[in-house]
Amino acid sequence: MDLFNVYPLFDVAPEKAQGCTVWDAEGQAYLDLYGGHAVISIGHSHPHFVQSITKQAEKLAFYSNSVQNPLQPKLAKKLGELSGYPDYSLFLCNSGAEANENALKLASFSNGRKKVIALERAFHGRTSAAVAVTDNPKIQSGVNPTDFVTRLKWNDLAQLEAHLITESYAAVIIEGMQGVAGIYEPSPEFLLAASKLCKETGTVLILDEIQSGYGRTGKFFAHQHAGIRPDLITVAKGMGNGFPIGGVLISPRFEPWFGMLGTTFGGNHLACAAGLAVLEVLEQEKLITQAAEVGHYLMEALSNLEGIKEVRGKGLMLGMELEVPAGPVRKALLFEHQIFTGSAAQKETLRLLPPLSMTQADAERFITALTSVLQKQPTPN
């Protein structure tokens, strides 16, 4: 049997990793500034993470949600404390798409409405409802429902207000910072107004923090830069540092009932051990503060480089819009300088989503390499 070929692959096969470094089978080291789509939050193979999941695997890897799992409330309590949402509840699942599916379902359950507002360039996942609110027709098949979604312009408050005052929408779903699109941040004014309008119209505000959460932007959640408190917050990626886990943080306004939501693998023992280890390392090593500081250094340095039109983002969620297509630059960084970076839907944008343990020395190495690569690029027309 062959693999179903849906991924364009670089000719690199990482074999082991530690911190911000990965090695291939030949022993070549690479600086990882992409973290596997922002998944690696506390660094590859962190000793506490490895020890935690190893000890749990030796005892019990999985049992279903039909029995007590003491790790689940422990994870929820720790997440509530560190994120600033101790009064919220947690539903555990397996991925970001699944988290968004459940958030959209919760919203509709709560007010009985069917329609959803999403924004241009949005990416929320590839499952049925999640892909319907994603702004990419290419990955929506005929069975994916799209008639319930209204897509609005980015940061267009007048348009948002005109739709919400009809009181016909179950939810508004917004990324704390758009990642796949090319690192675009909703303005604080837009988020504050959206939060107020949702409260006034009985609409559920969902903040998709799947890529932008868990300290990546220098606060636990990107929306906290605007000082709002959404009704639902979806998380995944950095939550498990590579172990599949996702979740929905749910405000006290929602009342659960048996069977309302469900999952086979979500919240399993190994996933909870991974999730707890991530939170413990984030706290003990002050990685959110480190992300803010290294990110600030990077933004200042990159903003002064020739060949970069704009630097967007916060913390260690950064996008550099180049004067040339990013693809050849990304390839040169990988094969000439052994540095992993990311692409974006915006073809001139290079994305950085490194482990939050990235150091200033790592940042300096990247800046030197990028400077060298950009100097060799053809002059744009």
Image: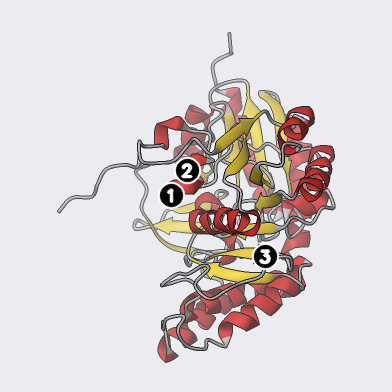
Q: Amino acid at mark 1?
A: Thr
Check residue 114 in the rendering and tell me which mark sits there, or answer none.
none
Sooner in the amino-acid sequence: mark 3 or mark 2 = 2
Disc 3 residue crowd, few under 14, some 14–19, many 20+, Cα 10 Å:
many
Q: Residue at x 41, y 41 (%)?
A: 144
Quickly name the residue at label 2: 131
- For the question of whether residue 40 can be seen, the reply is no
- CA gap, disc 3 to disc 1? 21 Å
* Location of the C terminus (image quadrant): top right
> In terms of depth relative to the viewer, which is nearer, 122 or 263?
263
Find out whether the residues at labels 3 and 2 contact each other: C-beta distance under 8 Å: no
Residue 4's x, y, as percent?
24, 46
Q: Height in image: 271 above or below 144?
A: below
Q: State the SS at label 2.
A: helix
Q: Position of residue 347 (x, y in %)?
A: 53, 27
Figure check: 164 above or below 40: above
Q: Residue beneath label 1, please?
A: 127
Q: Which residue position holds label 3?
A: 250
| Disc 2 residue crowd, few under 14, some 14–19, many 20+, Cα 10 Å | many
